Image (cartoon, rainbow, N blue to C red):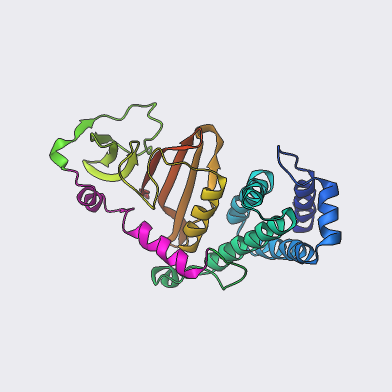
């Protein structure tokens, strides 16, 4: 599909969506004609989308298209509804979420162009555009919370969570285990809700399914909604992770960190949250095993 054809398709999709709470075609036209701020933000979003999408690899284009469709179909209107409950007008709310989406696209564009040296030096992020509440300092605080609780060195996680390896129950991995990475050859379970997946007895992936340990500020049984996912996604994107992917079949929200490996961009780490009835059901993360 040509870029111009895709862009037209995206605009049609934006205007034609009708979830339970959504911006109708007529409401959209009224916003454009009565609010200069919304009109300018809406026009800039169209320009930025075309620029960002056109500059990405085919793989990244497919990924960001899924993200944009999710924003159009669900995320945008859910966040607007939340903002209106807090007292913001509908016009201001749609203007804000449109500007926030421009930021997200700019973040993705910025991070996609970084060299491996830049990423290793922590130069992920974006230029300062429209952010008000979640400014750079707050995102740096999120990174500090993430780095001090989400340990990819599983031995360090065990120490932080006061887990004694001798108290674990070792098991084989069942073929229908929904949490197991496909290359795990065993797992070790602990009473606190921690399950570590193993390769040759070495832990490389963890799933937490009981309340008690906070990872990235999240723990099992906490409330979670689209607005909290929105803020979490900002923090993850700030650190250079891919935009959130939603697995509908498992009610799972996941983020992937990619790096250059042997001359190719490959996934190296994964972080995910599963939810049920507005509550966090599990939090998991680990390292990809690259063949």
Residue 205 is covered by the magenta coloring: no
The magenta stretch is: 134-163
Depth check: 117 or 36 in front?
36
Furthest residue in direction left, as rendered = 166
Picture residue at 75% right of the left edge, 53% below the top: 6
Q: How many marks?
A: 0
The quadrant in which residue 61 appears is bottom right
Q: Is residue 284 above or below residue 122?
A: above
As drawn, which residue projects farthest toward the front? Answer: 87
Taking depth in this image into account, of 71 and 182 the one nearest to the observer is: 71
Left or right of 283 in this view: 108? right
Indicate the position of residue 37 as horizontal and vertical percent values.
Answer: 76, 66
Q: Relative to residue 111, is residue 89 depicted above or below?
A: above
Predominant SS along the magenta part: helix
Q: Position of residue 255 (x, y in %)?
A: 47, 50
Asked whether residue 154 is drawn in magenta, I would say: yes
Q: Who is closer to the viewer here, 162 or 254?
A: 162
Residue 122 appears at what percent x and percent y? 41, 70
Image position of 223 (left or right of 88): left
Whether residue 53 is visible: no
Q: At 39% across and 69% down in the image, what residue appears?
A: 120
**200 or 68: which is nearer to us?**
68
Residue 220 visible, this angle: yes
The image shows residue 134 at horizontal and vertical percentages of 52, 63
Is residue 174 depicted above or below 235 in this figure? above
Does residue 217 appear left or right of residue 5 in this picture?
left
């Amino acid at each position: 599909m040509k870029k111009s054809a895709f862009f037209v398709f995206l605009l049609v999709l934006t205007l034609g969506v009708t979830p339970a709470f959504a911006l109708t075609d007529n409401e959209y036209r009224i916003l454009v004609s009565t609010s200069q701020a919304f009109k300018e933000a809406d026009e800039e979003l169209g320009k930025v989308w075309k620029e960002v999408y056109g500059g990405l690899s085919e793989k990244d284009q497919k990924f960001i298209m899924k993200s944009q469709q999710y924003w159009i179909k669900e995320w945008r209107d859910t966040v607007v509804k939340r903002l209106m409950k807090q007292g913001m007008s509908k016009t201001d709310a749609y203007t804000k979420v449109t500007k926030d989406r421009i930021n997200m696209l700019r973040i993705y564009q910025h991070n996609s162009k970084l060299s491996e040296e830049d990423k290793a030096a922590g130069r992920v992020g974006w230029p300062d555009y429209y952010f008000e509440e979640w400014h750079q300092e707050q995102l740096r605080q999120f990174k500090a919370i993430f780095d001090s609780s989400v340990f990819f060195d599983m031995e360090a996680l065990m120490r932080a969570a006061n887990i004694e390896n001798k108290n674990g129950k070792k098991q084989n991995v069942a073929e229908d285990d929904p949490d197991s990475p496909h290359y795990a050859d065993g797992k070790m379970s602990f009473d606190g809700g921690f399950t570590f997946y193993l390769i040759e007895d070495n832990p490389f992936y963890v799933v937490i399914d009981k309340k008690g340990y906070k990872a990235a500020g999240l723990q099992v049984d906490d409330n979670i909604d689209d607005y909290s996912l929105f803020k979490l996604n900002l923090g993850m994107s700030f650190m250079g992770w891919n935009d959130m992917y939603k697995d509908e079949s498992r009610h799972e929200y996941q983020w992937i960190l990619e790096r250059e490996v042997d001359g190719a961009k490959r996934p190296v780490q994964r972080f995910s949250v599963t939810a049920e009835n507005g509550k966090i059901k599990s939090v998991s993360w680990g390292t990809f095993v690259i063949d």
